[in-house]
Image (cartoon, coloured by chain):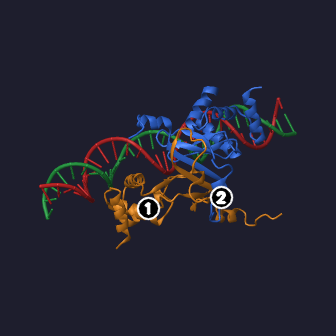
Chain colours: A orange, B blue, C green, D red
Amino acid sequence: MSASSTYEQQLRSADLRVTRPRVAVLTAVHDHPHADTDSILGAVRADLGEVSHQAVYDVLKALTTAGLLRRIQPSGSVARYESRIGDNHHHVVCRSCGVIADVDCAVGGAPCLTPSDHHGFSIDEAEVIYWGTCSDCATASQPTPATH
Amino acid sequence: MSASSTYEQQLRSADLRVTRPRVAVLTAVHDHPHADTDSILGAVRADLGEVSHQAVYDVLKALTTAGLLRRIQPSGSVARYESRIGDNHHHVVCRSCGVIADVDCAVGGAPCLTPSDHHGFSIDEAEVIYWGTCSDCATASQPTPATH
DNA sequence: CGTGTTGTCTTGACTCATTCAAGAAAATGG
DNA sequence: CCATTTTCTTGAATGAGTCAAGACAACACG
């Protein structure tokens, strides 16, 4: 059975109609985690031929709302999507080149996910973004690690 | 001595020239934490009269780079700024109305701020955003808390 | 298998936060 | 007070994302 039938099932169990653009978007996000909308549009078009950008926006919104995708948007970046969901993982973002990598929470479950004072908010999710520099950018900007 | 002289000192110690727009922006952000650029522009104009939006953008960028302000931008929101810096505090954002409140980290220092696998990244900051519903929105959408 | 209903996709225009560029004005150092 | 350098003004441009109306396709039902 093809990989796309898995996506088809995901769509059906989320009560969403199965359409070619939707399967293509699911496939694209699975294949390119943390891709932005434009890259996804490109991947979908490579797969299906011409597809309107509006369709991709609609599909991404529908799939995100249905919980099949997760949308992340670090400051200064455009919206990005990933298919790894429901496992409490977080992200490291490179300040220099913007790459995103997944990280699991160091302290097991959800330690700092319960703030001391919730100000009357009822909290349903804690999102953690680690900011730093990826090894490539660190190497590029400082070829010889200072020792003096 | 006026409150603005404090901001003047902040600017000088950050090696930034002291200009009326900069003092006004610092004042505005102190007075309206989590304000977006447009609100800040409004506050600055109420203070000084006509000021170009470009100036406010430039000032906000300069102050953020200098570390006098912190920029936050939850997904789906425009850029917002705050003056509380360097104290490892985080934010709760209401999914419904977008209000932002400050929260301190529950577990003291910086617990989950050291990911298990940093993928070669050198991390300098961990940003935590709690997503939920503020008490006002919770009340509005569900006047009678379910008890049955 | 055909048909109707409902939800999805296409097309095309539009909004608005943010950025770019060039010149005028103001802030610091001497 | 003048020169230098940075900042502010003006005006235009960029680009992610949204809105709206109609064409089209997926699914349920007979």
SS class, disc 1: helix
Q: Position of residue A41 (x, y in %)?
A: 43, 59
Q: Is residue A50 visible?
A: no
The structure residue drawn at horizontal position 33% and vertical position 56%, both measured from the top left corner, is: A16
Left or right, residue A126 beside residue A62: right
Q: Quadrant of residue D2?
A: top right
Number of other residues with Cα within 10 Å of mark 2, as a class: few under 14, some 14 to 19, many 20 or more: some
Q: Quadrant of residue B3?
A: top right
Q: Amino acid at mark 2?
A: Thr
Q: In the depicted view, which residue is nearer to us: B64 or D6?
A: B64
Instruction: Give the chain letter at badge 1.
Output: A
SS class, disc 2: loop
Is residue B86 shown above or below A141?
A: above
Q: Position of residue C4 (x, y in %)?
A: 16, 50
The quadrant of the image that shows the C terminus of chain A is: bottom right
Q: CA distance from mark 1 to mark 2?
A: 35 Å
Q: Return the mark for residue B114.
A: 2
Residue hosting label 1 = A42
Q: In the depicted view, which residue is nearer to us: D21 or B114?
A: B114
Q: Position of residue B53 (x, y in %)?
A: 59, 36
The structure residue drawn at horizontal position 50% and vertical position 39%, both measured from the top left corner, is: B134
Number of other residues with Cα within 10 Å of mark 1, as a class: few under 14, some 14 to 19, many 20 or more: some
Left or right, residue A57 beside residue B57: left
Q: Is residue B72 visible?
A: yes
The quadrant of the image that shows the N terminus of chain A is: bottom left
Mark 1 and mark 2 on one chain: no
Instruction: Give the chain letter at badge 2.
Output: B
